Amino acid sequence: MTETAETFVQTAPNPHKVPAGGGNGRVAPLVEVDEPRRATAAEQARTILANETVGTLATLQSDGSPWASTIQYGLLDDGSPVILVSTLALHGRNIKADPRASIAVAGPVPKGHDAGDSGRVSLAGRFEEPTGAVREAAEAAFFKAVPSSEGYISWDDFDLYVMRVEQVRWVGGFGRMASAKPHEFAAAEIDPVAPQALYAVEHMNDDHADALVAMARAFTGFTDATEATALRADRYGMDLGVVTPRGKVSTRVEFLEPINEATGLRSATVELTKKAREILGDPASSGH
Amino acid sequence: MTETAETFVQTAPNPHKVPAGGGNGRVAPLVEVDEPRRATAAEQARTILANETVGTLATLQSDGSPWASTIQYGLLDDGSPVILVSTLALHGRNIKADPRASIAVAGPVPKGHDAGDSGRVSLAGRFEEPTGAVREAAEAAFFKAVPSSEGYISWDDFDLYVMRVEQVRWVGGFGRMASAKPHEFAAAEIDPVAPQALYAVEHMNDDHADALVAMARAFTGFTDATEATALRADRYGMDLGVVTPRGKVSTRVEFLEPINEATGLRSATVELTKKAREILGDPASSGH
């Protein structure tokens, strides 16, 4: 199995009630460093939603019990989900009777990774039938996500709904989770590098293990790092799994500046590696 | 885009309220044939569930509104889902307060296919905390699906639940959907060929288009078939998209007998092709 964040000790305290004798130890950085920038929960949620078109809808049945069903969705510019459901389907009738609903969307699970350590988002709120310009934007958003819907969007039993988002919960994986407020969610930016991030992580691990060790030594405070694995990459930096003689730990490096282009991961990692080697005073310092 | 069932006219009437001027025409078979055997909704649901470990849970928040969240699940021998949730997470607290819940699971979407035309299943019921032998079976089922859970199943904030299934809804894709009763679901068999079905469909289309045309002519009543595409394969047969001079249609062929082994698709299609060519009285009859 590929190493995931779980393999490494979290630097944040474990919130779970671990039985006596279990639990994680803790490996501290040797040098104090500034907290690296991380995407907010709102950014993480917007990014996961923007890169998928299939999710699960939770609606209420007539007896008040919940009903989960797979759906396709589009997104308005503020991240509000748009769905198209038939009243021939139970979820369509449920929304007509009670517009309260929730949508969960899971991001991609890298091959060999534990799905429990992967990104997902839950939204909850109320569905509204859009009118006027919002209806036009909602139709366009749904078409964009589900091109085949052109064939049935005008059928009389289909209703187009926009969710007014009231709750946002992001789970990034083991020990990485947070809620966002609706206005933060609406205003948050989508990470432009997300579609390239899995490839970048694999490429760094396959071909640039020495660069990762240099980054870990120069920037994370784990100056005794002997191995480093990229766990995740985003526009602000990379999560690293680091091995030291004192144990394993998960930590993070921040890029020199946030990336604003889909193709920016390559130059950001090259620049960060260069800077790390400058700091370490040894262009060949690689841990190998 | 790959051709999907939607490209072909359904032989079943379209249940949607199609606006005047729209809608599907209908191409009838030229020869009457027996209805080919299809997997039941219960079998389809059990098969989708058995081949995934990630789904979405719908629970009730304290105000009665629904909450959708991504989960991992295992399955008891009767298909009852087993989940492990923390009371640190909203869904864990929701179940403690109200055990009514629903789980949706989506099957794989073949590359280039519309997710709306792919298999998914929704279950609804009540979660119960298993005891005794059921608890042991539930732990084993969850371990099997989520091996990493060994690390946290005994933590004090985690609860293991088994869903007592009360509602089962299967959607196979456009125009293919049905409900099952809980006792049918519990008794249904998992299709052993499901993990190989996508590959088999691709292989038949890439390398055995002539065999598919022979099957269509010999068994479906569309004796004027000029092209045939495999859409889906299962232990009982294959769904075909057929082109005739009169139009396109989706239909089905049944294997000579149901397949009982994971590796059985190859010999079943070989046997059916042989039989088709015997019936057509021409081993070279291939439409090419």
Image (spheres, coloured by chain):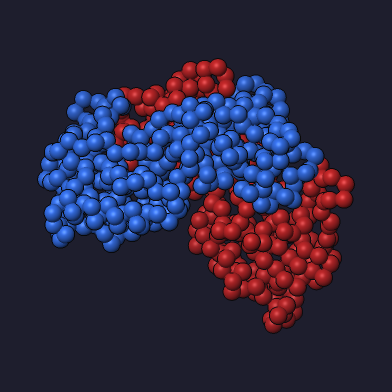
Chain colours: A blue, B red
Q: Position of residue B47 (x, y in %)?
A: 55, 47
Viewer-side residue, B205 vs A108: A108
In the image: residue B189, left or right of residue B74: right
Would residue A283 be found to the left or right of residue A148 on screen?
A: left
Q: Residue drawn 56% across and 36% down?
A: A78
Q: In this figure, what is the number of numbered marks?
A: 0
The percent position of residue A187, horizontal first and vertical second, equals: 51, 34
Relative placement, left or right, of B220 versus A25 is: right
| Quadrant including the N terminus of chain B | bottom right
Q: Compared to A273, does B217 lie above or below?
A: below
**Residue B151 in sight from this viewpoint:** yes
In x, y percent, where is residue A244?
A: 15, 45
Q: Quadrant of residue A258?
A: top left
Residue B244, position as x, y percentages in the image: 79, 69
In the image, residue A40 above or below residue B278: above
Residue at the location (67% across, 61% down)? Answer: B3
- A247, above or below B224, in the image: above
Q: Is residue B238 visible?
A: no
Residue B127 or residue A191, whichever sits in front: A191
**Which quarter of the figure is the C terminus of chain B placed in?**
bottom right
Quadrant in the picture for residue A91? top right
- Residue ranking furthest to the right: B20
Point 14% across, 38% down: residue: A31
